[in-house]
Image (spheres, rainbow, N blue to C red):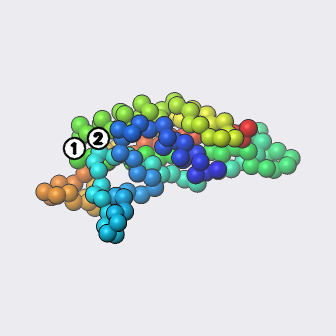
Amino acid sequence: MILEHYDAVKALLPPTINVYMWNVQGKLLPDGSREPIKYPYVCLWGDPGNESSGGPDGDSLEDVPDVLDLRVRATYAATNGDSLLIIIRNTRAALSRKTPVVAGWRPNKLRQSSLQDVQTDTSVTLTGGANPIFAVDEFALVSSKL
């Protein structure tokens, strides 16, 4: 159920956005090497969520999980400030206050909040010696089983 919710969030993003899930690495090529990472991009990741039963008033008598509370995180990365702001704008437009579709579940609208300000990623050095920049958003997602 967790994976289906993350996949549903990813499905809201248009194909014009470079999206990675959980970690950032290029596609595996037949010779065993990987495609280069394509900037700008968004990497979706997050927590495994909290499962509960019965809703906000407490667990149901059967105690069968029927509510999933996830925190989907989006790490944006780019080679310059303009590109970073564009990928943030486009991703937020596709996700914030939108409702993912998950079979057998009724997700609430995604709620965006900023988690980390724009920073330089000194652990990565691009061709030419520059470092990419990044920022992180969080999208709260609460979903109830139908």
Residue 2 lies, in percent from the top left, at: 61, 51
Distance of label 2 from label 1 (alpha carbons): 6 Å
Nearer to us in this view, 99 or 116: 99
Residue lying farthest front? 30
Categorize mark 1 by other alpha carbons within 10 Å: few (<14), some (14-19), many (20+).
Answer: some
Relative to residue 42, is residue 121 depicted above or below? below
* Three-letter residue code for mark 2: Leu
> Which residue is found at the position 20% from the left and 57% from the top?
126
The answer to whether one can see residue 25 in this image is no
Observer-nearest of 71 and 99: 99
Relative to the observer, which residue lies in front, 79 or 52?
79
Q: Which mark is residue 84?
A: 2
User: Dot 2, crowdedness within 10 Å: few (<14), some or many (≥20)?
Assistant: many
Q: Residue 80's image quarter? A: top left
Q: Residue furthest right?
A: 61
Apparent side of residue 19 relative to residue 108 in the rendered image (left or right): left
Circles 2 and 1: CB atoms closer than 8 Å: yes
Reply above or below: 105 against 31.
above
Report the residue marked by disc 1: 80
Does residue 5 appear left or right of residue 13 in this picture? right
In percent of width and height, residue 65 lies at 74, 49
- Residue drawn 73% across and 38% down? 146
Above or below residue 146? Residue 2 is: below
Does 72 appear above or below 88?
Answer: below
Mark identifier at residue 38: none
x%, y% of residue 20?
41, 51
Which amino acid, by three-letter code, is at mark 1? Asn
| Residue 46 shown left or right of residue 63 in the figure | left
Residue at point 41% right, 36% down? 14
Q: Assign a secondary structure to mark 1.
A: loop
Quick one: SS at disc 2? Answer: helix
